[in-house]
Amino acid sequence: MGTSEGLTAQTIRIAGFGGDEIEAYLAVPDDGAASRASVIVIHHMPGYDSSTKEIVRKFAANGYAALMPNLYYRIAPGASPDDAAAAARAQGGVPDGQLVGDVGGAADYLRSLQGSNGKVGVIGYCSGGRQSFLAACSLQLDAAVDCYGAFIVNTPPDGMPLKVTPIAGLAQDLSCPLLGLFGAEDQFPSPAETGELSKVLEEYGKPHEFHTYEGAGHAFFAVDRVAYRPEAATDGWQKIWDFYGRYLAS
């Protein structure tokens, strides 16, 4: 897919888990394409914020319809991203079942758009990386990207606000190829954890490719944080475009 000069981005409402109406951010290229693939963007633990909305627009600028559900909408409707994220941390994060329902609703919405080729990918950052894997094991999707998602294999340590359980056992149900992008200096997930996940996926014969960047830690894609690593992020984006080009756009 080529880069589009124009796009339309807007806040909409979609049907999420249990039929709940939730907020979501949609960006679609204004390129007049007769057929295009779609991507669901799962925001990081800090929430439904401007930096993640920029990622949604980046996908649209590269020819994809992209949609990010506000996973914290029920917890704090109308609150600032920081306040909503604080409320989400206080309750231990988003329940797994609710996440799957919200992503499923996002996928249904994207498939219903005029010009959709029917293929939907998912990408998530931080806690969203774990949730991207969870969604791909629980729904029928076409490609999944996990950007430094922890606690797929291991349990969060005491004192961490995220209260989730390991989900590596769901690997047998992975519905699509998985791309994993990680930092060698990250602790959550550590290279040992991502290596273990790769072994589990190999045991089930699930197609996946993992890349671990030296000199990078957690959140190396985040351009507005000190963790940003331009070389790792640039290479990571190229791997995302190649991966989605193979499994979604073709």
Image (tube, helix red, strand yellow):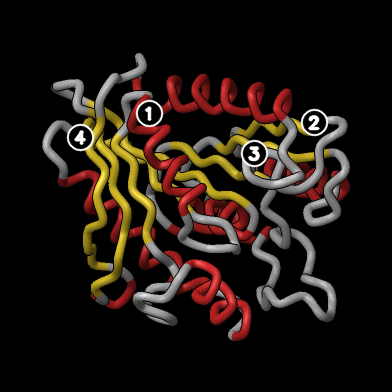
Answer whether labels 4 and 3 touch (C-beta < 8 Å): no
Q: Position of residue 43 (x, y in %)?
A: 51, 55
Mark nearer the N terminus (4 vs 1): 4
Q: CA distance from mark 4 to mark 1?
A: 11 Å
Q: Residue at x 81, y 43 (%)?
A: 217
Q: Name the front one of labels 2 and 1.
A: 2
Location of mark 1 (residue): 248
Q: CA distance from mark 2 to mark 1?
A: 25 Å
Answer whether labels 1 and 3 touch (C-beta < 8 Å): no
Location of mark 2 (residue): 213
Q: CA distance from mark 1 to mark 3?
A: 22 Å
> Badge 3: how crowded within 10 Å, few (<14), some, or many (20+)?
many
> Badge 1: how crowded within 10 Å, few (<14), some, or many (20+)?
many
Location of mark 4 (residue): 116
Mark nearer the N terminus (3 vs 2): 2
Q: CA distance from mark 4 to mark 3?
A: 28 Å
Location of mark 3 (residue): 221
The N terminus - image quarter: top left
Answer whether labels 4 and 2 touch (C-beta < 8 Å): no
Under mark 4, the amino acid is Ser
Depth check, front residue: 29 or 189: 29
Mark nearer the N terminus (2 vs 1): 2
